[in-house]
Image (spheres, rainbow, N blue to C red):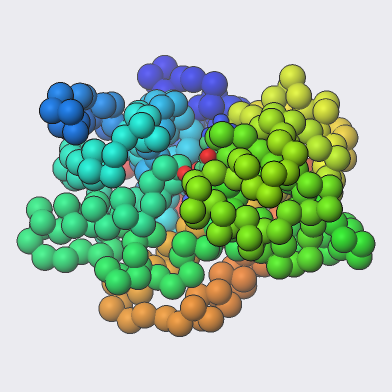
Amino acid sequence: MQEFYNETFLNAQKQLDHVAQLMNLDAGVHERLRYPRKALIVSVPIKLDNGQTKVFSGYRVQHDQTLGPTKGGIRFHHEVNLGEVAALAMWMTWKCALLNLPYGGAKGGVCCFPEEMSVNEMERLARRYTTEILSMIGPEKDIPAPDMYTNENTMAWIMDTYSNFIGYAVPGVVTGKPVSVGGSLGRKEATGRGVAHTVKMALEKLQLGKDEPTAAVQGFGNVGSITAKYLHQQGIRVVAVSDVQGGVYSAKGLDIPRLLSYVAERGTVVGFDDLDTIENKDVLELEVDILVPAALANVITEHNADRIKCKILAEGANGPVTPEADLILQNKGIFIIPGILANAGGVVVSYFEWVQDIQHLFWSEEQVNEKLGYLMGRAFEEVYQVSTNKKVDNRTAAMMIGVGRVASAKMLRGLYP
Ligand code: NAD
């Protein structure tokens, strides 16, 4: 199964191997969970605006289907490859199980440079990619959602393409859609809202919330910007944020509501209020109480982990900390809220959206947010209890819960044939 091997996939496997050993996991179940169940590589040819035809590589990987259909985002990015998608699919399995959602994990993506593409090219790419992976997806099979450089528009195109093939509207084939085509209120904000909720709980546990805590956020897209918005609303002083073009810093704290309007107009945080600029890598090393990496994987490695000075690290992104860096951060006493917990708000409200689509019965935003708060709070407490009782770090505790739930269902179902 070496097809999947790259740094990110091997990191995901290493994390699984670690908890499998601690839990004394059944060897057969462990072996089955180390690899995705199904993976598809497709060519995605589209006509560019200049009339030329270009072929992109697309992927969809389903890691595990023990607890239900698979669920996971679609990413358009130039670093997308089979190993990365497989690792992200595996993390989705643990995340869904940790939150007690009836799903397994999946992920998809197309290797491309979205910043260099027009909206029309993106639409053609999304539609052709959907056509190529059509046999794998469906409301009972595998339900995509947005991830890096995809958004509600992308989900509307996927839903439309799929529905055209089936012959009637199938809103439940994707989540993270616009509300007018069957999306859920509160979905767009759910991941960032969830990150901020887990930070609030961590501050309470560590009794750090009394003075005005400080925060830095790397990545200012869906997850980073909404996290910053809610941290700010919680009275936390957000001193630095960054995006792919660079970052801004103010010791007095950034005016996040005005920054959000600025970014909506300009598409970047750079230039806001003529503030001091800060490089992306330096955002991670600031002396702040809370650090939220909310962009790419593998940004904290054994090379910079020593210089990370936060007290709480909330993983908005998937896989921002390598296993080697994880050990260094733990030894420094940093309280890590692992991605499978911190950024789970997105898949929680995606689940609510899917349930609403299936029932054709829609909830108020208050209902959505209240249920989200309940599920995130419950998962946080469970992780905290396991971590305290078993004397393991939060990531190990979260994975022990997630892997444990999938493994016990696998044992009960047995191995076919
Ligand atoms: P997005 O496309 O909305 O935003 C990505 C942000 O990262 C942008 O601000 C971009 O400028 C920035 N960025 C890109 N390359 C960068 C670099 N090299 N350095 C610094 N910043 C960079 O994506 P998103 O949906 O916010 O996803 C961000 C992360 O959160 C990803 O790891 C994703 O897997 C994870 N995540 C997303 C969701 C969701 O609901 N969207 C849910 C769970 C986890």
User: Which residue is located at x 23 percent, y 43 percent?
Assistant: 120
Of the pair 8 and 105, the residue shown nearer to us: 8
Q: Quadrant of the N terminus?
A: top left
User: Which residue is located at x 7 percent, y 61 percent?
Assistant: 167
Of the pair 200 and 277, the residue shown nearer to us: 277
Left or right placement of residue 387 versus residue 405 in this view: right
Splitting the image into 4 quarters, where does residue 134 fall? top left
- Residue 262 position in % (x across, y down): 56, 54
User: Which residue is located at x 83 percent, y 28 percent?
Assistant: 307
- Residue 343 position in % (x across, y down): 58, 52
Extreme residue in the top direction: 2
User: Which residue is located at x 16 percent, y 52 percent?
Assistant: 161
Relative height, residue 43 to residue 358 (above, below)? above
Extreme residue in the left direction: 167
Left or right placement of residue 259 versus residue 176 in this view: right
Of the pair 110 and 287, the residue shown nearer to us: 287
Mark yes or no: residue 111 visible.
Answer: yes
Q: How many marks?
A: 0
Splitting the image into 4 quarters, where does residue 351 fall? bottom left
Left or right placement of residue 77 versus residue 205 in this view: left
Q: Quadrant of the C terminus?
A: top left
- Residue 352 position in % (x across, y down): 43, 69
- Residue 71 position in % (x across, y down): 39, 51
